Every structure is written in C-alpha cells, then in structure tokens.
Amino acid sequence: MAIKPRFFMVEKEGRVVVWKFYNPPNNIWTGETHLEFNDLVEELYADPEMRVGIITSAMPDVFILHFDVGSLVKSGEELQKNTPAQPAERPKPRGVYRRGPKVVIAAINANLSGGGLELAMACDFRFMAKNAAAAQGEVNVGILPGGGGTQRMTRLVGLPKAMELMLTGRRVFADEAERIGLITRACEPMMLMTETMNFAKAMAERPPLAVAHIKKCIYEGCDMPISQGLEMERTLFQELVKSEEAMTRMRAYVSTGQPSPRQRIQLELEAVQKQWEDCQKKP
Amino acid sequence: MSVKPRHFMVEKEDKIVVWKFFNPPNNIWTSEVHLEFNDIVEDFYKDPDTRVGIITSAMPDVFILHFDVAKLVEMGCELNDTGCCEELERVQAERGVYRCGPKITIAAINANLSGGGLELAMACDFRFMAKNASASQGEVNVGILPGSGGTQRMTRLVGLPRALELMLTGRRVFADEAERIGLITRACDPLTLMTETIDFARAMAARPPLAITHTKHCISLAREMPIEQGLAIEGELFMELVKSAEAMALMRAYVATGQPSPRQRIQMELEAVQKQWQELQKK
C-alpha cells in the first residue's frame, strides 16, 4: 500500500508489526476499514523482513464494535430494489481472512462483537484482556455472522458452544472464552500487550517456512479427509526436510551432542534458575 | 514377523500384548525401529489370540525422545541429490498403528516424549500418561513440521486453536493439561500408570472384537465425510453386527436375565462394587 493508512497506526518493532485500529467515536468496522486492513495484512505477507502482525485497538474502551449496520441497511435496500439476475461473484478472501503464510495475532484490549469478533477469529491467536467481553449478536437484528463467524467459531469452540453463542448472542468474558477455546489466553489488562508481544517475538524467531507449512497443514487438513491431509503433510514435510534452513538447524541440533533426557531437564532447571536470579537483581 | 524384535521387549498376558521400547541411551526412534514396530503391530492385527496392544518404554526417564534427527539430515541430503528418498517413503507409509487397524492400541506414556514419539502416541487409540511426564511437538524449532501425521491427528484430538499453538510454539505440556485439552485419555499417578492401563486394556479385551472393530471404523469416519454418508455406513455395519452369532448370543443372554429394572440395575452395580471392595480387603 503506497498510501498511508487512515484508520490504523502502524508501529514496527523488530520483525513484529502492530496495527492499532482507530475509528472514533465507536471503532466501527466499515467497508473502507476492511479493505484497508486487508491491504495491510497482504503487505505483511509480502514483506520479507516482517514475520508477525498484531491487530489491536487504539481506543481504551472498545476493540472493534461491529460492522457498520447503517451501511448494511443500505445494501439491504439496494438488494430489494434491484435483485441481480445472477448473484454477484464473491470476492476471494484476502488479508487475514485467507490465512496466509505468516502469523497474525489479535490483542483484544476491550469489548468486541459481531464483525470484530469474526476478525479476531480469523487471526491465528487471540490474547484478550480479562475485563473485555465478546459477543456474536447478529441474530438480534435478524442477520447472521457473515464474515466467516458461523464457520470459524464452530471450528474453534465446537458445535454445541457455537450454537449457543450465535443463537443467544450473549456476551462471553475472557476467562470463559479461554476455557472454551475461543481465545488463546486471557491476560491481565495491564499485561496484555507485553504478553502478546512476547509471544509474537517467540513466533518471529521460528523458521518462517516451517511456520507457513504447519499453518497450512493444520488449517487445510482439518477440512479434508485425514487420508488427504496426511498426503499433504507428507509432501510438505519432504519439502521442509531438504530445505537449507532445516538442514542447518537439524545439524546444529545433532551436533550439540543431543543431551540425554536427564541432562535436558537439568538444563531447563538451570535456565529457570537463571531467570529467577535475573529477576531478583532487577530493582 | 518371524524374527525376534531387536528394540522391543514383548510380553503377553492373556489377550494383551505389551511392547516395551528399548533403544539406549535416549530411546530415539529410528527408521529401523519404525519398520520393526509397524511389523509388530501388523502381526498383532492378524493374531487371533490377542486383542489389545500396549506400547510403553523400558527406560525410566524417556518414553520416546523423537525421530532420529541425524538420519533426517541424511534424508534431506538424499532428497536434494536424487529427488527422492526411498527410506523416507517407507517410513511415511500408513502401516501399523498409523493406519486405523481393527484392534485397540494403547500408549502407556511413562516418561517424557516429543516429536515422532508424540505422533506415535497420537496414532494409538488411547493414551495413558504419568503425571510427571511431559509432551511436546517441537519440530518447528528445527525448521520442519511433524511429518508422521502430527499436524492432522493433533488437530483432530485437541481442536484447531490448541493444535496451532502447540505446534507453532513447540512448548511442553504436562499430563494434567494434556488430559484437560484432550491430548491424552487419562493422567495417572506414575506408580499406578501400568496398573490403570492394564485394567483398561483388560476391559477392552473382554469386549466382542467385531463390535470394537466396527465402532472404531465408524468413529474414525465421523469427521471425514458428510453426516449422511457416515450414517449410511453406520447403518450397514449395525446390520452386519446385529446378525452376527456373537451379538445374537450376547443379546439373548441379556434378554434372558429378565431385563432388570433401573433400580435393580443400580442395586446390582452396588453389589459388584461391594464385592470388589471385600476382595481388596482380603489381599
């Protein structure tokens, strides 16, 4: 994207890019912000320097309210007036909705519902402040979650919970959301960005091709018969195992002399001990 | 297999066979071990006298460390040089426990496991794990992916979001968490791991074999096809079972007991527990 984004403040830190959504007064998601965000994510996928993207909100009391209902009414009126002879071809999913090769994380700092939750569910991981609540309440205005919500939520939390949440539209706080699998982790509000950033940095250090292929195997594999999934896994495994990066890393691993399980535990204990000592030193 | 296995101690007890893996110093899983184990399991599937197979480790501090990484480097080189690697193809074939066989296999995880070891355990029907053991799927750290069905089987066991987290971070999971998220069947006290596993295996061995085979088959198909097709197959196999001699005999016996009322049934169960308790006291 050559133009400066209008609704996002973009900050880069190492290989991690943070997009802070800002559309006052209510952080409503519109057609315009949607396209702009897709461009930003595609830009991340294309940038060889960057590895992980984090979407969060620049407003303290709302992450993303929901999609612009006013514009939905207008589209409804238009569809009523002139029903197209043929339904318009659906555009191909873009940005985070197409599950690209890099990791995208939602750092949910405040309440979200509707399209906001659908966006978060399209990300790979969701970190959520414990005082935030999520709701998928489309049913209350007579529509359905049309941004992938019915499909993605069902795959995240399973059939019975998905039924309950989308048919009642009730709010779910972070603790429950974590328990049912809707989010990755519920965080103390003060620690949300730190925890998300730490996780993102760990992700950014992992070999990018392995990350991309594992994502692909998991997402595509869960939607096909296991025999096909295994076939895909086998092919991608062979591609990785002969790659330069994997060979280097595996050689390094082997040449460390492969500590025995007991030594390994010892090493981990020493690492924890060191962390603890470092912690103590800090004022 | 006519040859005596080199890496497994095989013990038979009634209808249960226990394979104790022993490949010191670190219990690494090699191609040789892999092929040997596949042969053992295929033999077990054919043997009419055994019903349940248990894989465990003969070493106290490691179950299966992981697949032989040095070998993977060699395989990578061969793939780069010649474009194909026969040994890798053989290792990745769907045989032994990796295909959905007719009999029950259980992993009794007595100590830590990672990589290929966890993939093997996930290919079994049930996993009993000692509470002091931990599991990790850390392939991403050396730039490869879990290539023995890990991306497919873990996703089906723990669901999409957790699978993504565990395989992209490669973090360790202890038995209690593993049980909570569905990665294992049961977390056991280390001292009673084998007792609990054998008890469970005995109960399985006592059940009618054809019913077990068909139930396993139907369940393994549940996620692989639209529900109409799954129901059709279930119906077919049900008919086959209901007319089998074994089922007829069991159903007749059940009817002939005069079909106890729900209250009598609870009474009978209480008496059975009482009896168990008294026997325990006598020991």
Image (cartoon, helix red, strand yellow):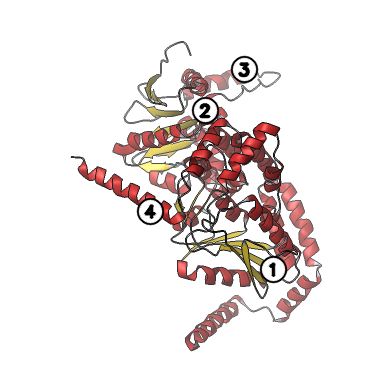
The answer to whether any part of residue B215 appears in the image is no
Residue underneath mark 2 = A96
The numbered mark, 4 or 3, whose residue comes first in the sequence reads 3
Q: Specify the label residue A266 is tagged with.
A: 4
Rounded to the nearest angstrom, the CA distance separating label 4 from label 3 is 72 Å
Q: Report in which chain the residue with disc 1 lies.
A: B
Reading the image, the residue beneath label 3 is A81
Number of other residues with Cα within 10 Å of mark 3, as a class: few under 14, some 14 to 19, many 20 or more: few
B269 is higher (above) or lower (below) than A251: below
Tell me: B248 left or right of A155: right
In the rendered view of the protein, which quadrant contains the C terminus of chain A? top left
Figure check: A66 above or below A222: above
Whether callout 2 and callout 1 share a subunit is answered no
Judged left or right of residue A29, residue A278 is: left
Circle 3 or circle 2, nearest the eye: 2
User: Could you tell me if residue A28 is visible in this image?
Assistant: yes
Circle 4 SS class: helix
Q: Residue A281: where, in percent of width, then height?
A: 21, 42
User: Foreground mark, 2 or 1?
Assistant: 1
Contact flag, marks 4 and 3 (Cβ < 8 Å): no
The spot of residue B19 in percent (x, y) is 62, 65
Residue position marked by numbered label 1 in the rendering = B51
SS of the residue under disc 1: loop
Of A105 and B37, nearer the camera is B37
